Image (cartoon, rainbow, N blue to C red):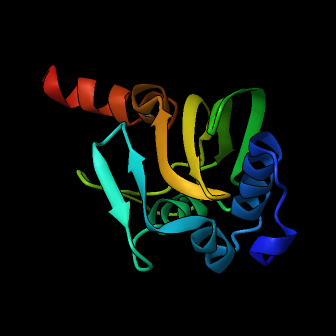
């Protein structure tokens, strides 16, 4: 999708960004960012920038959850900022790379709350803060209960 075909209002732009992510259109996703735009995964305090990194979280979650879905609940727009309350959903069927190591597929379902904040500039993403609820994700995948069991022994 060219920038001339992108929705002009912030909420529609963000909804289209999620649609592009759902399609795993990595090139399209990266094209949504300004040249020096950043993607911050706040749950692990990692900042992604540049053409080789901006799609890293999408690739990782797409690999781990082949049916990855983002259920959008609420969107609020304040100027050029869009705040989204959503859930990350999918079945864990592939390896999930994390800064702490790779989590092998569990077959468990993830339905975790998330809050995203998009700061837009000139019709593109300047900064994307993603706040997935990591403790819920790890609990639903069985990682925390397995970790708790191994620590108590």
- Residue 127: image x %, image y %? 47, 49
Q: Is residue 140 left or right of residue 86?
A: left
The answer to which quarter of the image holds residue 118 is top right
- Residue 12: image x %, image y %? 83, 46
The answer to which quarter of the image holds residue 134 is top left
Q: Which residue shows up at 37% across the image and 66% down it?
A: 49
- Residue 19: image x %, image y %? 79, 57
**How many marks can you see?**
0
Q: Is residue 124 left or right of residue 139?
A: right
Q: Nearer the viewer, residue 146 or 82?
A: 82
Q: Nearer the viewer, residue 28 or 4?
A: 4
* Figure check: 7 above or below 111: below
The image quadrant where one finds the N terminus is bottom right
Residue occupying the far top of the picture? 152
Q: Which residue shows up at 57% across the image and 30% down it?
A: 114
- Residue 65: image x %, image y %? 62, 56
Q: Which residue shows up at 82% across the image and 53% down it?
A: 8
Q: Is residue 108 left or right of residue 66?
A: left
Q: Nearer the viewer, residue 127 or 99?
A: 127
The image quadrant where one finds the C terminus is top left
Q: Which residue shows up at 25% across the image and 54% down it?
A: 99
């Amino acid at each position: 999708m060219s920038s001339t075909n992108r929705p002009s209002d912030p909420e529609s732009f963000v909804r289209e960004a999620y649609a592009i992510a759902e399609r795993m259109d990595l090139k399209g996703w990266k094209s949504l960012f300004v040249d020096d735009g950043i993607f911050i995964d706040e749950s692990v305090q990692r900042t992604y920038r540049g053409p080789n990194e901006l799609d890293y979280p999408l690739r990782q979650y797409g690999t781990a959850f082949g049916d990855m879905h983002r259920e959008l609940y609420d969107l609020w727009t304040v100027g050029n900022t869009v705040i989204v309350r959503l859930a990350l959903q999918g079945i864990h069927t592939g390896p999930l790379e994390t800064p702490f190591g790779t989590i092998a597929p569990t077959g468990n379902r993830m339905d975790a709350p998330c809050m995203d904040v998009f700061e837009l500039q000139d019709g593109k993403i300047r900064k994307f803060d993603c706040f997935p609820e990591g403790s819920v994700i790890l609990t639903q995948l069985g990682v925390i209960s397995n970790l708790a069991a191994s620590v108590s022994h």
